[in-house]
Amino acid sequence: MKAVKVEHVVQETPDITTIYFPSVGEAHPGQYFMVWLPGVDEIPMSLSTIGDPSSISVRVVGDATRVLSKLRQGDKIGLRGPLGNGYTIEGKHPFLVGGGTGIASLTPLAEEMVAKGVKPTFLIGARSRDQLLFKERLSKLHGLGLIISTDDGSEGFHGYASNYAGNIMTKSGFDKVYICGPELMAAKIWADADRLGISVQASLERLCKCAVGLCGSCAIGPYRVCRDGPVFDSAKLREVVSDFGKRRLDPSGRMIRVDH
Amino acid sequence: MGGLTSTSLAMDLAGLKLRSPTLNSSGVLGMSAPLLRRVYDSGVGAVVTKSLGPTGRTGHSNPTVVEVEGGILNAMGLPNPGVECYLEELRELKREGVPVVSSFFASTIEEFQASAKALCEAGADALELNLSCPNVGEEPGMCAADATSVERITSAVKRVAKAPVIVKLSPNVTDITSIAMAAERGGADAITAVNTLKAIAIDVDFRRPVLANVIGGLSGPAIKSVALRCVWEISETVKLPIIGCGGVSNWRDAVEYMLAGASAVEIGTAVMYHGFEVYNAVNEGVAKYLRENGFGSVKEVVGLAHRK
């Protein structure tokens, strides 16, 4: 556990905040930290910026994210990590699809790809134009093909990112698809990509308690999202096809339906 | 299962048939059938489920786990979906031919009996009584620390259980042998020793305990010598077979437990350090040790260090 002081905070969208803090060592795109807010909770957050400073980007969905989004410069948070496997850069023509805060973990991947001379295409999707995370940051990334979709049509493609991604994948010659976002979106894109024979890396989310691979609360099929993931490749996704986009364990270990 | 010589490692432990002397410890990877199936495919003799209560519990808030020197502290708060809800996982494991030890807890004698019946009917190959629960009926405090409660619960469960009953003991007691004797008097078929040691971790930057529950249980290499001493003392006191638990990370640890009197070992925290592979690695190491020292089975080394 390392305690770090918040360097600065950026309000990205009405409900997404990016919290910057000093680097706590080497990490790879797609890896996560357990972020401890004493007296509140400890939650998994993937890095939205890697390096110094590093950052996490948070949408308010509960108590912990509400407290996180209200942090100010100088406030302390506890970090455990980096944890998990992260993405691996593969393919000559990668296609990245990020929905909502899912854009956060794919952005450092896009940046690393560009730095390595790979030219990715990145579809970012959100409910409306004021919800689009990192649009400015990504539009400045030379070598990246940025595509935008919004559910309400206020910017870019009008409709779900998953539908647009399906159209794009059919026409373009992508040889690798990276997905992070709401699970129903991710599951649909994965199914489309798999049908087209394009291999996938998808970052999954499950309830994470111990984060060291022991408690099993983040189980999906025979895997632990905290330790075997959070990034799953096509072979592993095929093994968890009866769970991915369909069902997950609740905090008591009861199987419930995935609804978003 | 390559390399696992089942002939020398298989045993009958109080009626529970094990192909190898390793099990996962309760609370580790026991949340779902597919995870436990993966544990079984990693070489264990039987899988141990998450401790199941009469009704679902969400457990404590995070942090529930903190890494410390030589192990981890956890205060999960017994999250579980409840016995009834978990039966489908149990049946799935049984359909796949996996031997299952069902760990469970309750707060009244009636609940203990109802759960024991339900778990046996769903096919549990053995029951493991988790008595480190906060209270039972009118008696406050952890019942594993009270010999009378341990005897009473054990005998009540034995009256209704069709499968062998294993009593898991807590090391957080003054004299573990008196509790082991109580379990024996209650008719226990075997003993698991031991559960985690009560412990705390404090963060110096935030100047407060790390675990949301403040106090947790220590597991891992840090507790091995303490747990081994418990097995040693129990082995000198009762005749029941013992499953050693606490800090087993490699075959040497497992053999130490056997020499102290354990017939098998439960492994949990070591999965964090060594992955699922730890089970087969321990099995193969134990088999090699037995072979190289001229022993034909685990049974031949159990308790050997006690000889005068």
Image (cartoon, helix red, strand yellow):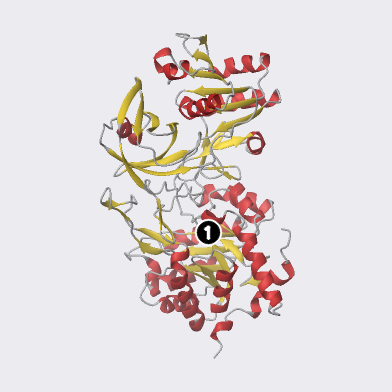
- Front residue of A55/B73: it is A55
Where residue A112 sits: x, y (%)?
A: 52, 28
Q: Does residue A132 appear in this view?
A: no
Question: Which residue is nearer to you in this view: B111 or B278?
Answer: B278
Which residue: 69% across, 71% down?
A: B288
Which of these two is toward me, A6 or B169?
A6
Task: Name the residue type under label 1.
Answer: Ala
- Which secondary structure lies at badge 1? helix
The quadrant of the image that shows the N terminus of chain B is: bottom right
In the image, is residue A148 above or below residue A62?
above
Tell me: A150 left or right of B276. Answer: left
Specify whether residue B167 is in view.
yes
Q: Which image quadrant is residue A49 in?
A: top left
Label 1: few (<14), some (14–19) or many (≥20) C-alpha neighbours in 10 Å? many
List the residue tagged with mark 1. B270
Tell me the subunit letter for badge 1: B
Q: Position of residue B242 (x, y in %)?
A: 54, 73
Residue extending furthest bottom?
Answer: B308
Residue in front for this viewpoint, B247 or B197: B247
Residue A202 x/y as whole percent: 57, 31
Drawn side of residue B192 relative to residue B214, left or right: right
The quarter in which the C terminus of chain B is drawn is bottom right
Residue A256: image x %, image y %?
Answer: 51, 37
Say how many tags the image has: 1
